[in-house]
Image (cartoon, rainbow, N blue to C red):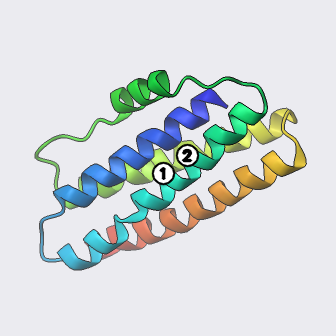
Amino acid sequence: MIKLLTLLNALSVAYNTAHHDTRNQAYFGDHEFLNAYSGVFTQFDLLIERADFLGLKPNQPEITKDAAAMVNIPTDAKPEKLFAILLSMESGLCGQIERIEKAGTCSCGTCKLLDDIADASETRQGHIKRRLMVA
């Protein structure tokens, strides 16, 4: 669960970074979509609270430090590169959720929360794939 929290936090940072680095002719559409960071952060917040309720004692400063280290966005990245990085991170997020659920260690409520996070991620992945096809 801690690895998933770190991935989700890193994804929020990556979306926020990409949101503020958007500069091209597709600026308005990209900038609007990249507002996803607020929703991703909300998911992170819900999951870290759940982890705490379950007694996992997540260390948020450590998670944030590890998440920041995971975000590897070059300062001169073109929009297509930014979206490719986000797509890869989203895919990793869903993969981590699958591993947790296959292990059979989460309650019905926690699995529902994870499913909601995976559903939102899959939707974002669809939008990113569509965006990359247009580029």
Say which residue appears at 34% left-offset and 26% top-offset: 69
Quarter of the image with the N terminus is top right
Name the residue rendered at 49%, 65% in the picture: 124
Q: In this view, does 21 lie above or below 105?
A: below
70 left or right of 41 in image: left
Q: Estimate the x, y position of residue 3 in percent, counting from the top left.
A: 58, 29
Which residue is the site of mark 1? 41
Of the pair 28 and 44, the residue shown nearer to us: 44
Against 58, is 73 above or below? below
SS class, disc 1: helix
Mark 2 surroundings within 10 Å by alpha-carbon count, few (fewer than 14), some (14 through 19), many (20 or more): many
Residue 51 falls in image quadrant: top right
Q: In which quarter of the image is the C terminus?
A: bottom left
Q: Distance between the residues labelled 1 and 2?
A: 5 Å
Mark 1: amino acid: Phe
Image location (x, y in percent) of residue 131: 35, 72
| Neighbours of disc 1 within 10 Å: few (<14), some (14-19), many (20+) | some
Q: Which residue is drawn at 76% across and 35% down?
A: 53
Q: Is residue 26 left or right of residue 3?
A: left
Q: Say how many tags the image has.
A: 2
Q: What element carries label 2?
A: helix
Residue pointed to by mark 2? 44
User: Toward which corner of the image does residue 2 lie, by quadrant?
Assistant: top right
Q: Looking at the image, do the residues carrying marks 1 and 2 touch, with CB atoms under 8 Å apart?
A: yes
Q: Where is residue 88 in the image (x, y as percent from the top left)?
A: 44, 47
As drawn, is 22 to the left or to the right of 69?
left
In the displayed structure, does residue 74 sit left or right of residue 45?
left
